[in-house]
Image: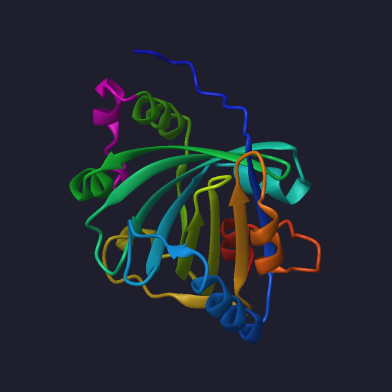
Amino acid sequence: METATTIKIPTRHEYKHRISQLEALVLSRRLGKVLRHDANVGTDGRYLVTSLYFDSPFDEAMQAKIAGISYREKFRIRYYGQKAGFIKLEKKYKKRDLGAKDSVRLEAFDVQRIIAGDFTFLKESKEMLKREFYLHLVAGYRPKVIIRYEREAFTYPHGNVRITIDTKISSSFDTKNFLGDARFYMIEADPILEVKYDRFLPDNIRLLVNINQKSIAYSKYVKGRTS
């Protein structure tokens, strides 16, 4: 079995801003007149995101974020919508305001096995990300918190721009019910705006977003663990 972990150099710009409910409403209407909603998920670009985050026994991913470590990694399992029909294992890489992500499909039955502590089947997977995740689970990585929120997503082809507005950000420590009826608690009253792009952000999109305040170092995972 291949034991090396992947190290990816993040190249995608990612900026987050805390905005008001009114700003979110105005921005949604403004962007909707020019940009397309993400057609891959949801209805009219709006959908529910539910993520199960994993961390080491010493909470290394959380502590790295709190300490402001430049290069960081974390694992999560995520599904979209009310039901877990499309599930992904993701590894997120961050270096300052740059990001990258690897992902692979998971079946609901396999997710339940992982949550229950039965993850040896990942060892022989043909997909490297699953094998790497297995190594982290062997090292003691376990589910820590579930984060759920509503997202509205817009896309723009030039610069591969993706703009999202996240609201009703909630968390649950009932990790065993990740695919079931876990009970959630609101942890963030304000919407979070995320602006992502590759090499450049077109001027017309920059004017549309029109955010004056500086970006924030915000992590839904950390917020969910510490609220």
| Residue 115 seen anywhere in this rendered image of the structure | no
Q: Say left or right for 75 vs 67.
A: left
In which quadrant of the rendered image does the C terminus lie?
bottom right
Judge whether 65 appears above or below 103 on screen.
below
Q: Position of residue 213 (x, y in %)?
A: 81, 68
Residue sitting at the far bottom? 22
Q: Nearer the viewer, residue 114 or 33?
A: 33
| Residue 15 seen anywhere in this rendered image of the structure | yes
Q: Magenta segment range?
A: 114-127
Residue positioned 58% across, 76% down in the render: 30
In the rendered image, which quarter is residue 218 located in?
bottom right
Q: Position of residue 73 (x, y in %)?
A: 58, 37
Residue positioned 57% across, 27% down in the render: 8
118 part of magenta stretch: yes
165 part of magenta stretch: no
Q: Say left or right for 94 vs 36.
A: right
Q: Position of residue 69 (x, y in %)?
A: 75, 40
In which quadrant of the rendered image does the N terminus lie?
top left
